[in-house]
Amino acid sequence: MKNLLKSLFAASVLMLSLGASAEEAQGPSLWDRLGGEPAARQIVADTYHNHKVNPIVKNRFEYSDDEYVKQRVYEIFAMATGAPDVTYDGDLAAIHKPMNINEMEFNAIVDDVMAALDKNNIGQQEKNEVLAILWGARPAIVNMNVTTEKLAPSAEEAAHAH
Ligand code: HEM
């Protein structure tokens, strides 16, 4: 009886600790680790400010409705980082396609986001995760016909060039 109680106790301790570690492994969302809405609003505002003074992209935003764009970017940033109650219902690819955006501009936008994360004291792990999200959006943003990959001759073309 004593042994039975002992092993029941051991089993429940084991289950409790497994439960706890499963929760730990999942951990708080990127959204929570960034600091939720106040931090996200500040990061978006700083990013947008960086675009407005970045010589590579500032002309793109010359005639933009600043508050509108910041709100939409806040929505997509929140959704992509795991905010429980924010959605973005626009179409990133459709909006950016007619702009014919090239790789240098894309990189400039990424730099602006990273600088905003630094300004808000976001840690390296979180920066890496945001970077991965941005990189995932690259095919929707950049006109892939003007990437250096497309401009460079393929190995076959290079071999046949005389
Ligand atoms: C991962 C990268 C990017 C994301 C997630 C992103 C996201 C967004 C979002 C959510 C909007 C608002 C669209 C809406 O009305 O629903 C927007 C607009 C815009 N984006 Fe991007 N964008 C990215 C990269 C770029 C790049 C590289 C450029 C060019 C330099 C760019 C230029 C613009 C411009 C000019 C607008 C329109 C502003 C306006 O309506 O006046 N974006 N972007």
Image (cartoon, grey):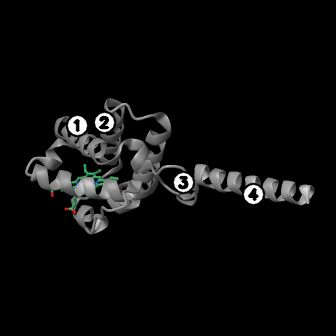
Of label 4 and label 1, which has the lower sequence position?
Answer: 4
* Residue 155 or residue 39, whichever sits in front: 39
Q: Quadrant of the N terminus?
A: bottom right
Name which residue type carries label 3: Ala
Q: Position of residue 111 (x, y in %)?
A: 34, 38
Question: How packed is label 4: few (under 14 Cα within 10 Å), some, or many (20 or more)?
Answer: few
Q: Residue at x 44, y 56 (%)?
A: 136
Q: Residue at x 47, y 49 (%)?
A: 132
Question: How packed is label 3: few (under 14 Cα within 10 Å), some, or many (20 or more)?
Answer: few
Under tag 1, what secondary structure? Answer: helix
Q: Nearer the viewer, mark 1 or mark 2?
A: 2
Q: Which residue is mark 1?
A: 50
Of label 4 and label 3, which has the lower sequence position?
Answer: 4
The answer to whether residue 114 is above or below residue 160 is above
Whole-number angstrom distance, CA of label 2 to CA of label 4: 46 Å
Q: Residue at x 79, y 55 (%)?
A: 9
Q: Which residue is mark 4?
A: 12
* Residue 154 or residue 8, whichever sits in front: 8
Whole-number angstrom distance, CA of label 4 to CA of label 3: 66 Å
Of label 2 and label 4, which has the lower sequence position?
Answer: 4
Whole-number angstrom distance, CA of label 3 to CA of label 2: 41 Å
Under tag 2, what secondary structure? Answer: helix
* Residue 35 or residue 79, whichever sits in front: 35
Name which residue type carries label 4: Ser
Q: Which residue is mark 3?
A: 158
Q: Which residue is mark 2?
A: 116
Whole-number angstrom distance, CA of label 1 to CA of label 2: 8 Å
